[in-house]
Amino acid sequence: MQSSYSYQALYRFTLDVFKKIGCNDPHAQIAAKVLLSADMRGVDSHGIARLTGYVRLWEAGRVNPNPDIQIVHQTPSTAVVDGDKGLGLVVAHKAMQIAMDKAEKVGTGWVSVKNSNHFGIAGIHAMMALEKDMIGMAMTNASALVAPTFSSERMLGTNPIAVAIPAGNQPPFVADLATTTVANGKLEVASRKNESIPKGWAQDNQGLPSEDPACVKQGGALLPLGGDRTHGSHKGYALSSVVDIFSAVLSGASYGPWAPPFPAYIPMPENMPGEGLGHFLGAMRVDAFRSKESFFENMDNWINRFKNATPAAGHERVLIPGMPEAEKEAYHKRHGIPLLDAVIGDLQQLAEKLGVQPLD
């Protein structure tokens, strides 16, 4: 069962929680907006359902609610940012602002981040660039839950990649994807619904295919994009590795199997080679390549042509990346955001524990 809540009600609750754990007003507002953007866009696995997880990280001393986010190395077009153990929701937002500032001055800006935490959905950070008619990119490494092709050992995270590209009269192109077959949150959702998962999503602790959404918690692993070698898992493995290197090896964050786990109850890896999680964010000014007007004209033409591609049998239309999420956002603005009863129960317990006004 589920119930729907207005964005305003969820924003008020989320803001109260972040302020209660010590975030200042600007940081609490950013964190709440970034977190709820996932729910608005229909990415339930990365929205308010994760709020309790962030609080647990704070309770474990792994999140600094008032970080001193600093540039520790830079050139005119690049920077390394130390997130000071802040909420990744806030650290990545700041890093993207830095990338955009550099792009405004020299055409492009690229920022690699260390000493951060889980940053929510990648797409919302990439989409910040759209406000200035720029192309945005965002990626992050994550908890080691993914087995490389042919491995039974968990070595990589879901390591998402997002790219947001502005257009003229058409909605922007927004690709936001995990480099695994599915994000771990999909298994969490399946568990809450007492549903099995399709083959190709995960494997058990012996490396065998599993349909049990709890298999990863029991020592199994998520699978790279493609599921197995026959279906291209080596490509997902390679993409995930690129994200890990750009986000963590480049910045000085912990990478691969040493990436800090999101669940606070999981012990931190031993002999970690870097600091915290890493992100990689970029912004490109369109007119650093060609006139904005001609680019927008071609982007509109590109989007129109793909939207009008002949649908395959059994399908009504061809989708543009970002279109389903934009439609979900419009729907949720009108009808509210649905939450599963299990999520509502977690949030009400959180309200009682922290002494904030419960959801209404």
Image (cartoon, rainbow, N blue to C red):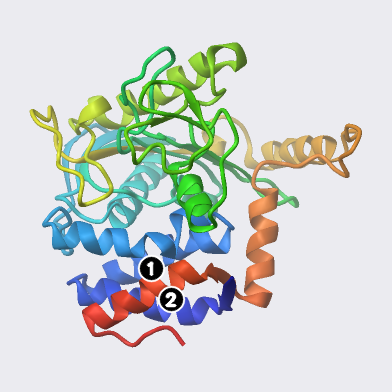
Q: Which type of secondary structure does the marked residue at label 2 adopt?
A: helix
Q: Circle 2: is it few (<14), some (14-19), or many (20+) Cα within 10 Å?
A: some
Q: Amino acid at mark 1?
A: Ala
Q: Amino acid at mark 2?
A: Tyr
Badge 1 element: helix
Q: Look at 49% across and 80% down and name the residue there.
A: 8
Circle 1 Cα neighbour tier, 10 Å, few/some/many (<14 / 14–19 / ≥20): many
Whether residue 255 is visible, yes or no, is: no
The answer to whether 315 is drawn above or below residue 251 in the figure is below
Q: Is residue 358 above or below residue 256?
A: below
At x 41%, y 40%, the residue is 103
In percent of width and height, residue 70 lies at 16, 48
95 over 248 or under it: above or below: below
Disc number for residue 11: 2
- Considering depth in this image, is 8 or 125 the residue closer to the camera? 8
Circle 1 residue: 32
Q: Earlier in the sequence, mark 1 or mark 2?
A: 2
Q: Do tag 1 and tag 2 residues touch (Cβ < 8 Å)?
A: yes
Q: Residue at x 74, y 50 (%)?
A: 170
Residue in the picture at 46% in, 76% down:
10
